[in-house]
Amino acid sequence: MTNEIKEKMNTRPSFPEHAVVTGGMPYGNKDLHFGHVGGMFVHADTFARFLRDRIGGENVIFVSGTDCYGSPITESYRKECEAGTFSGSITDYAKMNHALQVETLNGFLIKPELFAASAFGRASEIHKEISDYFIETLHKNGHLTKTTTLQFYDPERGVFLNGRQVVGRCPISGCQSDKGYADECALGHQYPPSELINPKSALTGKTPEMVEVSNWYVKTDEMHDLLREWSAELKARPSTRPFSAAAIEEFLEPPVIYLKRDYLDELDGLKGELPGFELRDDGKNKASVALVFDRLAEREAACELLSGKGINFRTGKTLVPFRLTGNIEWGVPAPALEGLGNLTVWVWPESLWAPISFVQTFLEVKGEDRDGWKRWWCGKTSGVYQFIGQDNIYFYGPAQTSMFLGMQGEQPSAVPAEDQLLLTNIVANSHLLFLDKKVSSSSEIKPPLARELLDYYTPEQLRAHFLGLGLGIRSVGFNPKPLNPRANENDSDPVLKEGNLLTNVFNRVARSCFYTAQKYCGSAVPSRPLSAEAADMAVEAVLDYERLMSRCEFHQVMNLLDTYIRGINKYWSKYMKEADAADDTEKRLDILADCLHMVRVAAVLTHPVAPSGSEMLADYFNLGCDFFTWENIFRPIADLVPPSHKLKFLEPRVDFFAKHPSQLGE
C-alpha cells in the first residue's frame, strides 16, 4: 500500500449511525416531469442507497411524498374541473396524481422507505398531529406573532386569493424571476403582499383588492444572530454547495431599500419622518443607493412612508416573519390559538415538517413505536440529508431552521441539545435545463414527463447521466437526442455517455471474468493472493468514492467510476494478452483473481447508481445478501467463501447492464 493510500485511509470521512434522507415533495397537481426525477430524486435515492450499503440498511430511512396542499393544486384542480378534464373531489385529484408519481418513481428504480401523501391515508392523520405539535410548541415557546396584514381579494368572485391565484412582478431588487405571486416569487423570494408589483387575479385577470386578515407567523427575523451562527457551521459541512451557502447569506443581510438617485433630494426632505437608517453609496451603482435599517419594522415603516409620497423603490433580501397559517379551505386545519380560529396551515411550513410525519408513519407501519422518531431526527449520532432544488433554499434554510430552533424553547441554541431537532444537511441542486433552456409546466417549451424518457432509455442509463451532469455546481442542459429537434441523425446521444460505461465497458470486463472462470477453473473463484497493483487500485477507488459521496459530489463519483472500470478493463486486456501469448494458465488464474476482486468492488460502488444491473452481477457472484456491505469491501473474494464456492454459470452474450430495446439496432 502506497503512502498516499495510507494517508487516505487515515483521513476517511465519518457517517452518522442513523440517517434520514428526504426528497423535496412534488406538488400533487401532476405527474413528475424530468426535472423532478433527474434534478433531485435520482440524487436522493443514490445517496440513500449508498448509506444503506455503507452503514446498514436498517440504519437509513429515505422518505418523501406528494405535497397535496397549496395553491398549485387548487388552481390545477379548478382549471381541470372547469375544462371538463377531471371530475371528482380535490382529494381524488391528489390521489390520482400521487399514484402517477409512485409509478414514475418505481420506473426509475427510486425506492424510498415511504413515499406518502400529506392529505390522505394514515400519513395524513399523523401529519395533522405533527402540525398541531409544531404550531402549539412554537406558540408556547414565544416564537410566533399574530399579525394582521393585507390579503388579495377578488370582489368579482367574492373570494380571497391564495398564493398562485395572484400574479405580478417580484419587488426584490435584482430578482430575475418571471413570475411573482402573492407573497413569494417563482425563485422563493419572500415579501409582503402589498409590495407585489402590478398584481392581477388569475381568476378574472383584474386587479384585486387588499383586505385585512390575521395570521400566525414565525419570528424568523428575530433569530438573525442564531441563523448567522448556523449558516457559518452549515457552510463548513462537506455536502453544502457553495451556491447554497451564498444564497442563505443573502437572506441574512440587514433590511435594505434601494432608492433611485433621482429621489435623493426628496429623501433629504423626509429624514425627519423616516426611521433611522444608514445611507450606503459605494459609487458602483449609478442608478440607486441603499438605505440600510437595523430592524425589519423600521424598513416597513419607511416603505409605507415612501409609497405614500409616490417615491418608487425596491427592497432587498432579508429575514422576514415566516407565515404559518392562511384562510384557504384546502389545507391542514390549524389549531385555534388566542381565539384565532378557522385557519389552515400554509403549505410551505407543513411540507417542511412532513418528513418527520412520514418517518413516524414508516415506524408505525414497521410495527415500531412512533415515538422512536427522535432517534432519527435528534442527537449527535444521527444525520438528516435533505435533497432539494435551488429555488427552495430559503424554505429549507432560514425558514425551516428558524422553526426547528424555535422548537427548543424560549432561548434556542444554534448547537442543538441531544434531544432537540438536528439542523439538517441541505443538498441543493441547480436547475436541470431542457435543451439548454429553463422550463416549467407553464413555459412555452413543455418539459417531458419523466416516464416519457423511459420510452428511449433504461432507468440506469438515465440515472447515470443525471448524476454525471454536475448539478451541484451549475445549471446544466439535458439534451436527449430523440427529443431534440435540432439533433442530426449522425450526432451521438449525450445522454448515453455515462450509460455506455456500464453497457459497454463494465459488461465486457465482467463477462470476460465469468467466461474465463468457466473455461479454466469450472466457475470456481481462484484462491490466489491479490497483486499489489490490483489491491491498491481497488482500495484507492473505494477511499476516493467514499470521500466524494460524503460531499455529495455525484459528477465526480461518475468520473471516478469511469476511471476505475476502464482501469480494470485495461488491466485485464494487458495482462491476459500476455498470459494468452505464453499460454500460461497459472498467470490467467492470477489475473482472474485480481479482476474478480476489482469487478466485485466496482459492482459495490456502482450499486447506488445502477442498482438493477449491480444486483444481477451480485447474483452471479453467488455471495448472498452481504455482497454490498462495506464491512468486507477490501477483502478478496477467496477470503469470504469456502474452497468449494462457485460463480453462477453465465450464458453467452448475457448483459448485466442492458441497453434500451430502441438502441439494439444501433
Image (cartoon, rainbow, N blue to C red):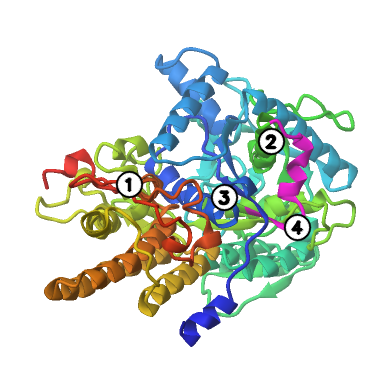
Residue type for callout 1: Lys
Position of residue 260 in the picture relative to residue 125 (left or right): left
Which numbered disc flags the more N-terminal residue, 4 or 1? 4
**Separation (CA) of disc 3 from disc 2:** 33 Å
Q: Residues within 10 Å of mark 4 (few under 14, many from 20)?
A: some
Q: Which element type, helix, strand or loop, lies under badge 1?
A: loop
Between circles 4 and 2, the one closer to the viewer is 2
Percent x, y of residue 491: 14, 56
**Separation (CA) of disc 2 from disc 1:** 37 Å
Which numbered disc flags the more N-terminal residue, 3 or 2? 3
**Separation (CA) of disc 3 from disc 1:** 53 Å
**Quarter occupied by residue 216:** top right
Which numbered disc flags the more N-terminal residue, 4 or 2? 4
Relative to residue 62, is residue 570 depicted above or below? below
Relative to residue 334, is residue 641 depicted above or below? below
Q: Please give the residue where the numbered disc 2 appears in the rendered image.
A: 363
Q: How many marks?
A: 4
Q: Are marks 4 and 1 in contact (CB under 8 Å)?
A: no
Does the rendering let one see residue 470? no
Disc sitting over residue 600 in the figure:
none
Which numbered disc flags the more N-terminal residue, 3 or 4? 3
Between circles 4 and 1, the one closer to the viewer is 1
Q: Please give the residue where the numbered disc 4 appears in the rendered image.
A: 296
Residue type for callout 3: Gly
Region rendered in magenta: 367-384
Disc sitting over residue 188 in the figure:
3
Relative to residue 419, is residue 3 depicted above or below? below
- In the rendered image, residue 281 lying in the magenta stretch gets the answer no
